[in-house]
Amino acid sequence: MIRFRPKLLDTLPGYGRATFINDFSAGITVGVLALPLAMAFAIASGMSPAAGVWTAIVAGFLISALGGSKVQIGGPTGAFIPIVYAIVADFGVQNLLIATMMSGVMLLGMGAFRLGSMIRFIPVSVVIGFTNGIAVVIFISQIKDFLGLDIENMPGEFFGKMETLLAAMHTVDLPTVATSIASLAVLIAWNRAARQIAWMRRLPGPLAVLLIATAVNALIHLPIDTIGSRFGGIPQELPDIGLPALSLGTLGKLIAPALTIALLGAIESLLSARVADNLIEDRHDPNQELIAQGVANVVAPLFGGFAATGAIARTATNVRSGGHTPVAGMVHALVLLAVVLALAPLASHIPLATLSAIVVVVSINMGEWHAFAWKELARYSNQYRTILLGTFFVTVVFDLTLAVELGMLLASLFFIYRMSDLTRIERVPLEDHYGVEALSRSDGTPRIIAYRVFGSLFFGAANKLENLLLMQEGHPDAVILDLEKVINIDTTGLDALQTLHRTLQKRGAQLILCDLNDQPASLVFRSGFQASLGDDNIAVNMTEALIRAQRLHGQEPELSYA
């Protein structure tokens, strides 16, 4: 049964005036922060600034209203820039909108089938690798607008992009570079000063530098590209609502891009929700969050918007500004709507160089660069370093989907190897506890041999059990396996046990199991192995197993319990 219960419903009982004032104030703060980011991310993604703003409005409202987190803020994010840009370059804007809607359906399915918790299975080395890789790709994507290079069509592929940038370096525009550097300096200085000066914290750095640069450009008309010169400004009206043009010929080709958007959207939103949980000491519903993300990505393209997910920086700003409930996120979307309807004409003066500087700072801040320092890397294993650096490299040079696939494959292989290495089988020195006479024949060869198994008997370690008979001296009458330290047995491990049992039977010997934990015992009984082995040959502990082993040939036990 699909469970649908947004966090908004849990926060409405007892909702009062004081809470609304806090949410309203936080919503305004996040709304003014989201405005420059939404435009900057859209332009960097190859979309119009209006597309970014409407994504923030529509998706931001739906993610807050329907989501599984109390304070999550949704909208376009920097992580989507390389993915969206590549889709626009390869398939066009209309197909991007279709791919976004397809990703929304995928996210809805993930939430409906309660796969939200599975996102947490992605190792931190993979997350850091692709996050830093995306940051590098975003940084590279801003070189053109930051330097004012004369490039008509920027390739989406890494090597083509680098070749195009190098070939156009002679077209650097000095006024654009000056504006970019000045905007970058003001933004960094503002963010640092805001840590000490209270009133500056009320005006987010990106919005402050945007207002300053726009005012300067409106007064002296700098010879640089603006939103007005490239995009014709932002329409001061509601967009036309409708389905994007669908081409059945390209629908199959959009499955992979849509899956990439869905995968990144799920990871990014749930990471953001976990950050929010730590800030407000709450627990989000990951499946409800995926459902909200799915609805948002289905609806936003109807308004000309594109991919959206949870935004970590805006969510943290919401919490720091006093946001307590999803109402703050809904207010943030309404603030953006009011700005578009009232102040859209002023956006035509916004310098693209300033927006590029904002995205550059975002790309630098989103990366965990300390994780790449050799001192930090040296603390971890070669496997960790291989996964981290491999995921990072593939993200930068190829694409995110391949990077995550490679990272998960490497992580899985290394985990299998590690678990196999930790699984071991040791001979139990029965003579130290029970006396040689009871356990050995007259010629000194052992009648009973016992082994203690540690770890997990799974497909990666089954060969150790298969090689067990090679460790034996002579042909014992009974082999006891103490499985008290075995936490798990899979079907391959079970098959190895059955093979061992058949081999011992051919030699006239008996396999005895003892100290089975819940999961191994469940599999042994469910598979029918218990019936072929015999109830008497599954013992509670080592003592009972030894008693059973001595009685196999009519011998009364001569055990010493000292």
Image (cartoon, rainbow, N blue to C red):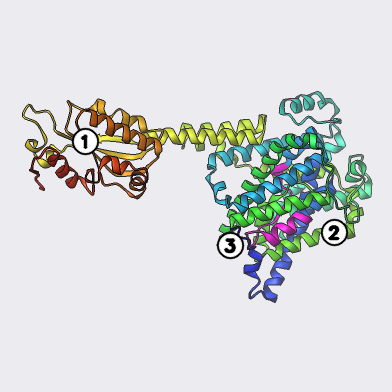
Amino acid type at circle 2 is Val
Give the residue at mark 2.
339
Which badge, 1 or 3, is on the more N-terminal residue?
Answer: 3
What's under tag 3, amino acid-wise?
Ile
- Contact between marks 1 and 3 (CB within 8 A): the answer is no
Asked whether residue 50 is in view, the answer is: yes
Q: Please give the name of the residue rendered at 88% of the width and 45% of the height, measured from the top-left corner.
A: 227
Mark 3 in CB contact with mark 2 (< 8 angstroms): no
**How far apart are labels 1 and 2 at the CA level?**
81 Å
Q: Nearer the viewer, residue 309 or 312?
A: 309
Residue 183 seen in this snapshot:
no
Mark 1 vs mark 2: which is more N-terminal? 2
Q: Which residue is mark 1?
A: 510
Res 488 quadrant in image: top left
Does the magenta portion include 268? no
Taking the image as shown, residue 245 lies to the left or right of residue 360, namely right
Q: Look at the numbered disc 3 and give the secondary structure of its residue.
A: helix
Marked residue nearer the N-terminal end (3 or 2): 3
517 sits left or right of 396 in the view:
left
Q: Nearer the viewer, mark 1 or mark 2?
A: 1
For badge 1, the amino acid type reads Gln
Q: Which residue sits at x=52%, y=45%?
A: 121
Q: In the figure, is residue 45 to the left or right of 289?
A: right
Q: On the image, numbered disc 3 is attached to which residue?
A: 280
Q: Which residues are magenta?
A: 57-80
Residue 240 in percent (x, y) is at 88, 52
